[in-house]
């Protein structure tokens, strides 16, 4: 007998759907808060652990590579636990990652910080594998981008707050701290760097407590199970002869588009503080707010998506416009002067906002019983955030502004997926 709490599509009542969206929205808030702390951790650990640009961007590599490693295992875990228990487990794993920051701070060991970030990313991989397809099937497919946009607002509001909160704790003296440490020698310098490293302990202990509390709340919540792999009659007929996920080429084209997108989103959010400070001499006390500008621009893009998709513009056309805006702002960042270039990076937030919400339903369209596995491939694509930022960092050691050329081919491919790629091999 089928579990009465399990649904194959939208939740059974409007009230249940609303409660589900609120719970998932809270999880997306957590995604955003933890993820966008990296924009502050990069310059922070660069100082505390005495790193160069290339080394400092391994913060995002350690965090995002976990999605590549853990996405398929996450799909297996969800098959065993279901969505709700899987989300609860993901939050516990994230709490473990936060705890690892404590010995990392006391020892000022960059490798331990990276391990903590990897473990947090592992928990997020499980959460994302569950929550994204969950949001897609909570309502009609043609409005999936709208629902994901609502989740995006929860995510990016947290992202706006995260660098402000952590930056206020870690950079209390801003550029004066850097000057002071540079002027010290021997044991005095080591003591100053140790004190800086240990500033991270209190916020990450608080994060651990909050994550464990949320895990309990999700576990005991009324969040219903959904069957994301369910097929209607027409879809089942179209997929009758499908025996493998590899028979859906549009999924893999979408996976690569998402890989590139996550890379450019992370570059836009996580490089802007260092870029403004190093390339244009903007003090850290001011530059630490710029990541919030990028995420604020994304929120504007999400709001536009909520009110326009699908009533005025389709998911496909929204993706086309996003790619074109990404190319425009990318070129302004490369060729613009000073503050104009920095603001172009911030405005990439508008270009990026609707890319994730549009690619997910377009890439998962028609997968039916292959949806869970397809979702895990899309989660693996988040590893783009591990690969592209260090590429930017490598070139940034020569010229931080020209290093933004890495954005251009990424947006060109996203434009290809929006115009042609999402239709290749699809029957429905």
Image: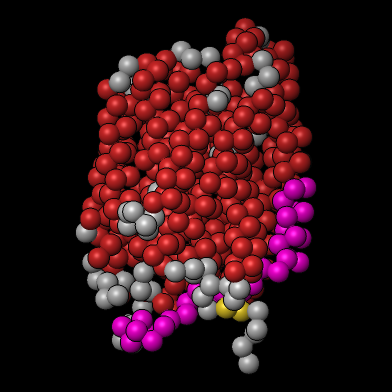
Most extreme residue toward the bottom is 1
Q: Nearer the viewer, residue 380 or 184?
A: 380
Residue at x-position 69% and y-position 26%: 169
Q: Position of residue 95 (x, y in %)?
A: 71, 50
Q: Position of residue 32 (x, y in %)?
A: 57, 45
Q: Position of residue 30 (x, y in %)?
A: 63, 48
Q: Position of residue 338 (x, y in %)?
A: 37, 16
- The relative height of residue 177 versus residue 397 in the rendered view (above or below) is above
Q: Is residue 336 left or right of residue 144?
A: left
Q: Is residue 134 left or right of residue 390?
A: right
The magenta segment is: 209-238
Is residue 133 a member of the stretch shown in magenta? Answer: no
Residue at x-position 76% and y-position 66%: 220
Is residue 227 a member of the stretch shown in magenta? Answer: yes
Q: Nearer the viewer, residue 110 or 335?
A: 335
> Which quadrant holds residue 122?
bottom right
């Amino acid at each position: 007998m089928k579990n009465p709490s399990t649904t194959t599509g939208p939740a059974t009542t409007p009230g249940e759907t609303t409660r589900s969206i609120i719970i998932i929205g809270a999880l997306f808030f957590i995604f955003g808060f933890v993820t966008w702390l990296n924009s502050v951790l990069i310059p922070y650990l660069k100082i505390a652990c005495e790193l160069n640009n290339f080394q400092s961007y391994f913060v995002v590599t350690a965090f995002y590579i976990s999605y590549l490693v853990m996405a398929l295992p996450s799909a297996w875990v969800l098959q065993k636990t279901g969505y709700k228990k899987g989300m609860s487990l993901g939050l516990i794993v994230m709490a473990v990652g936060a705890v690892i920051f404590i010995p990392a701070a006391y020892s000022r060991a960059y490798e331990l910080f990276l391990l903590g970030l990897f473990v947090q990313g592992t928990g997020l991989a499980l959460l994302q594998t569950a929550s994204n397809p969950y949001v897609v099937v909570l309502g009609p497919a043609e409005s999936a981008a709208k629902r994901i946009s609502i989740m995006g607002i929860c995510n990016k509001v947290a992202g706006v707050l995260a660098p402000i909160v952590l930056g206020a704790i870690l950079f209390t003296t801003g550029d004066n701290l850097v000057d002071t440490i540079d002027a010290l020698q021997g044991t005095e310098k080591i003591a100053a760097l140790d004190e800086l490293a240990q500033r991270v302990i209190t916020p990450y202990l608080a994060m651990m407590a909050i994550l464990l509390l949320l895990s309990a709340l999700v576990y005991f919540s009324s969040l219903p199970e959904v069957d994301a792999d369910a097929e209607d009659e027409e879809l089942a007929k179209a997929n009758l002869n499908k025996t493998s996920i590899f028979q859906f080429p549009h999924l893999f084209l979408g996976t690569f588009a998402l890989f590139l997108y996550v890379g450019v989103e992370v570059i836009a959010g996580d490089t802007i503080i260092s870029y403004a400070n190093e390339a244009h001499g903007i003090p850290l006390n001011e530059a630490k707010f710029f990541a919030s500008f990028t995420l604020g621009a994304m929120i504007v893009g999400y709001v536009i998506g909520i009110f326009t998709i699908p009533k005025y513009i389709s998911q496909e056309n929204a993706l086309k416009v996003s790619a074109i805006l990404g190319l425009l702002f990318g070129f302004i960042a490369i060729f613009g002067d000073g503050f104009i270039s920095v603001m172009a990076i911030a405005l990439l937030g508008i270009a990026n906002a609707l890319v994730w919400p549009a690619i997910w339903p377009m890439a998962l369209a028609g997968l039916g019983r292959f949806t869970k596995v397809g979702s895990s491939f899309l989660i693996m694509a988040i590893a783009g955030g591990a690969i592209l930022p260090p590429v930017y960092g490598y070139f940034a050691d020569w010229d931080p502004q020209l290093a933004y050329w890495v954005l251009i081919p990424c947006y060109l491919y996203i434009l290809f997926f929006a115009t042609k790629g999402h239709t290749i091999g699809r029957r429905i």
